[in-house]
Each structure stands twice: as C-alpha cells, then as structure tokens.
Image (cartoon, rainbow, N blue to C red):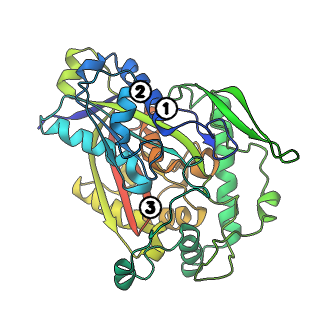
C-alpha cells in the first residue's frame, strides 16, 4: 500500500471570537482562503484535486450545503471538484486529514485537500438554534452526555487532584512559549494573512461600525501574562451546571473561543516524487477512543496507547507532541498519566494562548507539528486531543 504524504499546509491567523478580526467573516470565506493557498503551495492544478474534506463542529454560512464543497467553490476550484464536511468536534480537522490519507492509500484518490475551520463568532451566540437540542433518549442512557465542557474540566480537576495553581502555571507556560514562538517567527511558514471587515460595537452609543483589517498573526495570545494575574481571575461556570460552583477553570487557564481555518494537501507519495515535491511528512495512522462523557478531557489517555501499540512505538519514541489545550487541567493529567516529557509537549504553546476554533485545531496542530518537527530534526510527532461527548483522538505522523 502506498504512503500518503502531506505536501503543503496553510492556515489563517486565529482571530478572537466576537471581538476579533473575523467576527463578521463567514465560514466559507475562511475555508476558501486556506484551501486556495494550500493548493497553490503544493503547486497543484486546482482541477487535479479529487476531493475537499473539511471538519466543522458548528455549521455557519452553509444553508444545509457542506462546507467542503462551499469552500472549494469559493476558493475558485472548478465545479468538477467535490467536497465533504465531517464532524468529530475538536478533532475534526485531524480526522479530515486521516480520511484523505486513507483514500490516497487505498488508491481511490490521488490529491485531496483536507483540514478544518470554525466561525465561533457567528454560531456560538444568542442566535444559536437550541430548539429540541437535547435528546431525552440520549439522556436516559448517558445522563452526562450534554454536560458543558467547562463542567467536565471542573470534574477532571477535582477528581484527579489537579490544583488551580498547577493549572495557572501551565497556562503561563503556554503564553510564554507562544510569545517566544511569535517573536522567532515560528508560525510564519503556516500562516497566510487574510483581509476582512470587522464589526466594532460601541458600548457607549450601542452603534455598530465596520472597519477593514488585515490579520497576519494570531491575535489572542497575551505576551504580558503574569502568574499573579492568572491567579487573580475568578472561576467561570456555565449556567445550569450540575456542580454549581466553579473552583478551577478560569478565562486564563482554558482555551480561547476563536475563529480560523487550516488546510493541507494530501497526496500519494509516488505522485509527489514525480512532481519533485518535498513532503512535510507521512501519515502513519489515527486512533480514536471513548471515555466517560463527564471526563471527556482525559480522552487522549485512551487514544494514545492504542495508536502507539499499533505502530510498535512507546511514548519516548515520539519526538514532538501536540496535545490540544482545551483546559489546562486535562493537559496536565494527560501529560503526566502518559509520561510525556514537558519539553516535547506543545513547545510553541497551544489553544490556551493561540486559540481554539474547534474544527480547525486538529489540522493546525498537524501542520505545525510537521513544520516544527522539521526544524528540530524530529522523526515522529503525535497530535492528540480530547473530544466532546467523551472521546479522544490521536494521530501519528513521520516527519520527512
């Protein structure tokens, strides 16, 4: 069976939800931008693309049509290029890459664009459709299935003894690592700046105005973060939660709500060789696993061992880890339970500092791990994340 290789990656900068550069930018615009640039970076004729597979957790700007097809059309790819939308929540972008790779390895397709995106600004708001959003049939079997993510993080922190202090310390590390990476230009190779029109709300006059902006770097991180500032933040908690009082999770030690998109081009290794392309890396496999819904944050603890066992590897064989920072508590637990070296983990920060557009993150992590892995002379990288509803996903890639 042939190898599937990733020959290009492209992503938007990540914008702050509601107040950031993309707060009035439709999801297909975000998707089209990265699809177009990933194809251009691969040097592929758009007509050669066999499929566009994009992950999206909360559809926006689709009107029932799938975001893969809409992004392909908006990117200027010909009508002959199909598209598909998938959803495994926070792992969607990486799962899309896995599906593309499997199609290539099976010989069914030769060139596939895959990734993910999210417009949280235009979906996770007061207009979100909540009519009959909760199924009684599901609750009868699993009473915690619809538990808010913040509440699951509180449970993980309480149940596994992850202190507020350690969570804030980890959040500070994320901010510091991202600040250093930005200053050193370690995100520049993956980011493609995007022009947009931002809506600005004037609290005094209650009026909304619009301004043209160009975002060329992630805008959510806070380089001036101090541990004292993190410690001073009050816990936040969702209305109607089972546990009424938050103790651990704050705006400083949890992932940011964000908007953005990421895509890569996956290709048959032989085809890449014929074209004279130097792949970023080789897809080796993905594993998914389930866990208790109220402990969804620890999903990587169940997905990673299965992935490594299948490939005859141990934790120490992995040179670089990207573990999505949904909440500091679950990253700490997964890191320590799996025995991951902190110096190999999220070396340029993660979702706490960079942001977490749900459908995008998995693809962003893969692209970044391959580029950073090349800089560090790594061989194997693993990208892993918890998934809402009580799941974990993990992907193995070999750096070229």
Estimate the spatial distance between the alpha carbons at disc 3 and disc 1, rounded to whole Å: 27 Å
Q: CA distance from mark 1 to mark 2?
A: 7 Å
Residue 43, percent from left and from top: 34, 15
User: Which residue lies under the disc numbered 1?
Assistant: 29
Secondary structure found at label 2: helix
16 left or right, relative to 395: right
Foreground mark, 3 or 1, reads 1
Q: Quadrant of the N terminus?
A: top left
Whether tag 1 and tag 2 are in contact, CB under 8 A, the answer is yes
Query: Which of disc 2 and disc 1 is earlier in sequence?
Result: 1
Side of 245 relative to 28 (left or right): right
**Rendered location of residue 3, percent (x, y):** 19, 35
The quarter of the picture where the C terminus appears is top left
Q: Which is nearer the N-term, disc 3 or disc 1?
A: 1
Would residue 320 be found to the left or right of residue 85 on screen? right
* Residue that numbered label 3 is attached to: 386
Vertical order, 140 against 256 (above or below): below
Q: Residue at x 24, y 54 (%)?
A: 312
Q: Say which quarter of the image contains residue 50.
A: top left
The secondary element bearing badge 3 is classed as: strand
Residue 102, given in percent of the width and then of the height, sits at 20, 42
Res. 290 image quadrant: bottom left
Among numbered discs 2 and 3, the one appearing first in the sequence: 2
Q: Which element is circle 1 on?
A: helix
The outermost residue toward the bottom is 140
Compare residues 243 and 177 and report the one nearer the observer.
243
Residue 393, given in percent of the width and then of the height, sits at 36, 57
Instruction: Look at mark 2 in the image and give the residue it sits on.
Output: 74
| Residue in front for this viewpoint, 318 or 397 | 397
Report how many numbered discs are placed on residues in the image. 3
Is 157 left or right of 227, judged from the image as shown?
Answer: left
Q: Residue at x 82, y 43 (%)?
A: 202
């Amino acid at each position: 069976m042939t190898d599937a290789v990733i020959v290009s990656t492209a992503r938007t900068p990540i914008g702050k939800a509601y107040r950031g550069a993309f707060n009035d930018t439709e999801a297909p615009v975000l998707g089209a931008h990265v699809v177009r640039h990933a194809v251009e970076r691969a040097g592929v004729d758009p007509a050669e693309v066999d499929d566009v597979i994009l992950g999206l957790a909360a559809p926006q700007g689709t009107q029932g049509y799938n975001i893969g097809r809409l992004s392909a059309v908006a990117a200027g790819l010909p009508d002959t290029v199909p598209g598909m939308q998938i959803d495994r929540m926070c792992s969607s972008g990486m799962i899309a890459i896995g599906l593309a790779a499997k199609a290539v390895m099976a010989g069914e397709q030769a060139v596939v664009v895959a990734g993910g995106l999210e417009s949280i600004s235009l979906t996770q708001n007061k207009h979100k459709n909540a009519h009959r959003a909760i199924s009684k049939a599901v609750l009868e079997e699993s009473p915690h299935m619809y538990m808010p993510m913040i509440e699951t993080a509180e449970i993980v922190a309480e149940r596994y003894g992850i202190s507020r202090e350690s969570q804030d310390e980890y959040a500070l590390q994320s901010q510091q690592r991202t600040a250093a990476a930005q200053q050193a230009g370690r995100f520049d190779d993956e980011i493609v700046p995007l022009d947009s029109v931002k809506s600005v709300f004037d609290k005094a006059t209650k009026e909304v105005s619009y301004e043209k902006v160009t975002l060329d770097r992630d805008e959510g991180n806070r380089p001036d973060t101090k541990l004292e500032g993190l410690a001073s933040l009050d816990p936040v908690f969702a209305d109607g939660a089972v546990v009424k009082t938050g103790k651990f999770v704050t705006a400083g030690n949890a992932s940011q709500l964000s908007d953005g998109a990421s895509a890569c081009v996956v290709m048959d290794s032989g085809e890449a060789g014929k074209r004279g392309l130097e792949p970023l890396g080789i897809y080796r496999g993905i594993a998914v696993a389930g866990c208790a819904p109220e402990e969804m944050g620890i999903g990587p603890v169940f997905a990673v061992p299965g992935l490594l066992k299948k490939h005859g590897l141990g934790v120490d064989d992995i040179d670089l880890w990207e573990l999505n920072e949904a909440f500091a508590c679950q990253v700490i637990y997964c890191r320590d339970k799996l025995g991951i070296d902190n110096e190999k983990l999220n070396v340029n920060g993660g979702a706490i500092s960079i942001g977490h557009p749900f459908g995008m993150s998995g693809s962003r992590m893969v692209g970044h791990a391959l580029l950073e892995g090349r800089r560090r002379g790594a061989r194997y990288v693993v990208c892993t994340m918890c998934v809402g509803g009580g799941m974990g996903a993990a992907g193995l890639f070999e750096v070229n």
